C-alpha cells in the first residue's frame, strides 16, 4: 500500500503541471486573437488661444478714509449707520467733552484773573478820561490808558473762550470740534463706536479713535499679489478679467495700473503687489473687500489653427505629430494655453493626427 502511493503522487504532480501549461498556452492564443483598440484620431481646428496668469486679491475702494474725533470725550450721538451715503461735511457723531479737572481749574482761574484786570483797566481809563476832559491830563497819557483797557478786554475775551473750549470743546462758530463730520463724499462702510464709548482725540502723538470709515464706492480697484515667476511677463496697461466670489454670475473687467517695485515674502515665496482699475457693470454693486481672482491676459491669438497638445511628440527634440498613414510630420508651434497649441506650420485643417 505505501508503494502504491509513492507511485501515484509523481503521476498526479506531472499531470497537474501539464494541465496548467496547456491552460496558459490556450489563454495566450485566445488573447492574441483579440482585435487591437483603434487609435484615437483628431484634426486641427480654428480657435482662439489666450495665454494668461492668475492673481488673487480683493476689490477695495481707491479712497477710504478713517474718520476720527478731534477731541477726547464720550460719544453722545450717532447720526449714520453702515450703508448710508454722506456728503462732505455731513455729521457722523457728536462727542461730549469730559474736561480734565486741573485744566478746567486753570482755565477758570485765568478767566477770573483777566476779569479783575479788565475792571481795573476800565476804572483807570474812566479816571483818565475825566482828567483829560478837564485839561489836566496829556493826550499821551489818555491814549495809554485806552490802550491798556483794550488789551485787558482782549485778554479777558481770550480767557473766556479758552474756558468754553475746555468745557464744551468749541468756542462758537460753524466749525465745532465736538461734531465729527465726513471729510469726503461716499458711503459709510462701518461705524466702530457706539453711544457711550470713550474716544481719544487725534494729535501728533496719538492716531486717535476711529469713529467710522467712509469710502467712495464709485471708484474701486483690485489689489492682489502676483508670484515672482509671473511678474516679469506683465506690464501696466494689460487688460484683466475679474471673478468675484460674491458675484458668481458677473465677470468684471479692469486694466492693470500698478506693479510694486519691491516684493514681499509670503509662505516661502516672493509676491509682488499689483493694482488694477475696474469698472463694475451698471446696476451691479460690489462690496468692499470682496475676494476676487484676476485673469491677466499675457498674449492672445484669435482664429488660428490649433491642435490638442495630447497629440504632440518630442522624440527627436522638436515637436512633431504622427499622421493617420504612419508618417511623422515636424511642426512649428506658437502660443499655448496648456490645453491647445497654435500650429504655425506643418498641418492643415483636413489632416488626421494620431493621439499617442
Image (cartoon, rainbow, N blue to C red):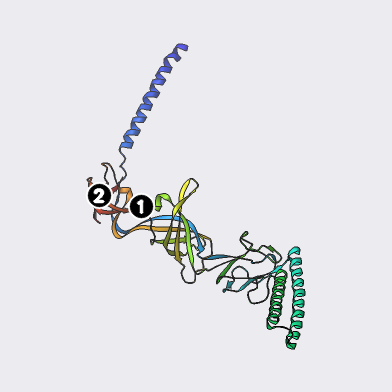
Q: Would you place residue 146 above or below residue 48 in this image? A: below
Neighbour tally class for label 2: few under 14, some 14-19, many 20 plus, Cα within 10 Å: some
Percent across and percent down for residue 157 are: 70, 75
Viewer-nearest residue: 101 or 276? 101
Viewer-nearest residue: 350 or 226? 226
Percent across and percent down for residue 145 are: 71, 79
Residue 306 location, quadrant:
bottom left
Q: Would you place residue 333 above or below residue 89 in this image? A: above
Residue drawn at the location 35% of the way across and 53% of the way down: 337
Percent across and percent down for residue 154 are: 69, 76
Residue 78 location, quadrant:
bottom right
- Nearer-N-terminus badge (1/2): 2
Viewer-nearest residue: 262 or 175? 175
Neighbour tally class for label 1: few under 14, some 14-19, many 20 plus, Cα within 10 Å: few
Quickly name the residue at label 2.
331
In terms of secondary structure, where does tag 2 sit? loop
Q: CA distance from mark 1 to mark 2?
A: 17 Å
Viewer-nearest residue: 261 or 244? 261
Which numbered marker is on residue 339? 1
Which numbered marker is on residue 52? none
In the rendered view of the protein, which quadrant contains the C terminus? top left
Residue drawn at the location 77% of the way across and 80% of the way down: 123
Residue 175 location, quadrant:
bottom right
In terms of secondary structure, where does tag 1 sit? loop
Residue drawn at the location 68% of the way across and 72% of the way down: 170
Q: Is residue 1 visible?
A: no
Question: Position of 243 compared to 130: left or right?
Answer: left
Q: Would you place residue 298 above or below residue 149 in this image? A: above
Question: Position of 54 compared to 39: left or right?
Answer: right
Amino acid at each position: 500500500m505505501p508503494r502504491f502511493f509513492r507511485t501515484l503522487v509523481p503521476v498526479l504532480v506531472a499531470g497537474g503541471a501539464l494541465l496548467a501549461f496547456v491552460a496558459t498556452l490556450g489563454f495566450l492564443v485566445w488573447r492574441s486573437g483579440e482585435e487591437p483598440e483603434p487609435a484615437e484620431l483628431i484634426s486641427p481646428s480654428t480657435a482662439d488661444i489666450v495665454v494668461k496668469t492668475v492673481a488673487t486679491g480683493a476689490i477695495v475702494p481707491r479712497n477710504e478714509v478713517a474718520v476720527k474725533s478731534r477731541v477726547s470725550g464720550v460719544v453722545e450721538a450717532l447720526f449714520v449707520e453702515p450703508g448710508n451715503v454722506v456728503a462732505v461735511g455731513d455729521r457722523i457723531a457728536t462727542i461730549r467733552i469730559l474736561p480734565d479737572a486741573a485744566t478746567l481749574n486753570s482755565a477758570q482761574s485765568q478767566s477770573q484773573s483777566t476779569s479783575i484786570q479788565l475792571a481795573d483797566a476800565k476804572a483807570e481809563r474812566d479816571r483818565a478820561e475825566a482828567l483829560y476832559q478837564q485839561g489836566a491830563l496829556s493826550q499821551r497819557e489818555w491814549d495809554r490808558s485806552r490802550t491798556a483797557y483794550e488789551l485787558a478786554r482782549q485778554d479777558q475775551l481770550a480767557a473766556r473762550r479758552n474756558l468754553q473750549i475746555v468745557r464744551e470743546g468749541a468756542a462758537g462758530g460753524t466749525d465745532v470740534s465736538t461734531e465729527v463730520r465726513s471729510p469726503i463724499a461716499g458711503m459709510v462702510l462701518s461705524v466702530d463706536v457706539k453711544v457711550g464709548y470713550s474716544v481719544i482725540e487725534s494729535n501728533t502723538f496719538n492716531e486717535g479713535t476711529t469713529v467710522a470709515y467712509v469710502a467712495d464706492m464709485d471708484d474701486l480697484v483690485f489689489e492682489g499679489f502676483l508670484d515672482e515667476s509671473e511678474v516679469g511677463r506683465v506690464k501696466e496697461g494689460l487688460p484683466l478679467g475679474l471673478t468675484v466670489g460674491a458675484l458668481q454670475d458677473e465677470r468684471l473687467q479692469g486694466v492693470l495700473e500698478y506693479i510694486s517695485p519691491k516684493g514681499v515674502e509670503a509662505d516661502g515665496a516672493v509676491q509682488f503687489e499689483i493694482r488694477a482699475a475696474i469698472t463694475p457693470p451698471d446696476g451691479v454693486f460690489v462690496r468692499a473687500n470682496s475676494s476676487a481672482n484676476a485673469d491677466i491676459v499675457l498674449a492672445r491669438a484669435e482664429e488660428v489653427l490649433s491642435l490638442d497638445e495630447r497629440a504632440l511628440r518630442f522624440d527627436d527634440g522638436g515637436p512633431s505629430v504622427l499622421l493617420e498613414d504612419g508618417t511623422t510630420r515636424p511642426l512649428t508651434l506658437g502660443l499655448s494655453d496648456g490645453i491647445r497649441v497654435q500650429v504655425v506650420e506643418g498641418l492643415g485643417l483636413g489632416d488626421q493626427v494620431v493621439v499617442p
